[in-house]
Amino acid sequence: MNPLGNAQGAAPTQRFLGSGSGITNAERDKIYTWIIELANPDTRENALLELSKKRESVPDLAPLLWNSFGTVAALLQEIINIYPAINPATLTAHQSNRVCNALALLQCVASHPETRSLFLAAHIPLYLYPFLQTVSKTRPFEYLRLTSLGVIGALVKTDEQEVINFLLTTEIIPLCLRIMESGSELSKTVATFILQKILLDETGLNYICQTYERFSHVAMILGKMVIALAKEQSARLLKHVIRCYLRLSDNPRAREALRQCLPDQLKDQTFAACLKDDKSTKHWLQQLLSNLESTAAADPRIALPPLAAQ
């Protein structure tokens, strides 16, 4: 049974899961059945599980999910149903696993070029922000935060201006900064990656460096992370932190401030062993230090107060 319905005719079926998709007729029918079962609360849990397993192997699953009747509403219902369990923090492992399967399907939609713009236009990422605001360190909450970050990470990975423009109208930067300060190593890594992608966009860099308050918040959190990484080193996380610093140094205002507040651990040999086999990150660090040592004339129009000692 085709979940796109007769109103859209046969063409969408062939387009989404046609002969060129590598999907057998039996597999196609199973996928259609699971999508239809999402609309029924009694069959939804198993359908979420099965479809989440298929998101990597079915290339056009995202447009099929988006265009099938009631599917996105069902996924959003799964998210909203969890809100009462996050405050007070009563989320169970079973609840977390179920909603994360729904989030995995939304990540599939966020990643696909045909559905990404529609996903943003519907402001669906905002439904995930309450999960990013949670602070409980239990495993169910950590899994929930990490999977939610994965959806945002899938968006920014595309390097599309539309994504950055949307995110800058939301509170994603402070949410990521809070996770970067207090999350697990994996959550910190994904949150820092998201910040890095925002910074690599010219609009994002200008937004963060537009006011001293925004820049100083970012610099303070990055500085705290460097101090923590000096005690418990992680090459994967350090790579993203250094890349954020390097990108900040491309902005004249930020570069001037970083000359005063860059952590000493990035200037000495604290991370030499950690970066020994990572040529790209070592190069970024050397470029960062070179940028800060440059003696370019200061812009007289720029007056930045010194950063408070950390």
Image: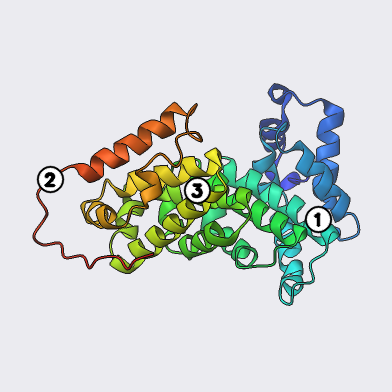
Q: Distance between the residues labelled 3 and 1?
A: 37 Å
- Label 2 or label 1, whichever lies nearer to me, is 2
Q: Name the residue under label 1.
A: 98
In the rendered image, the vertical position of residue 31 relative to residue 163, given as above or below: above
Residue 275 on image: x %, y %: 47, 33
The residue lying at 70 percent from left, 48 percent from top is 104
In the rendered image, the vertical position of residue 170 relative to residue 192, given as above or below: below
Q: How crowded is mark 1: few (under 14 residues within 10 Å), some or many (20 or more)?
A: some
As rendered, which of 268 and 193 lies closer to the eye?
268
Q: Is 264 left or right of 55, judged from the image as shown?
A: left
Residue 18 on image: x %, y %: 72, 27
Residue type indicated by callout 2:
Ala
Q: Name the residue under label 2.
A: 296
Question: In what quadrant of the picture does the C terminus appear?
Answer: bottom left
Q: In which quarter of the image is residue 254?
A: bottom left
Q: Give me the disc on residue 230.
A: 3
The residue lying at 40 percent from left, 32 percent from top is 282
| Label 2 element class | loop
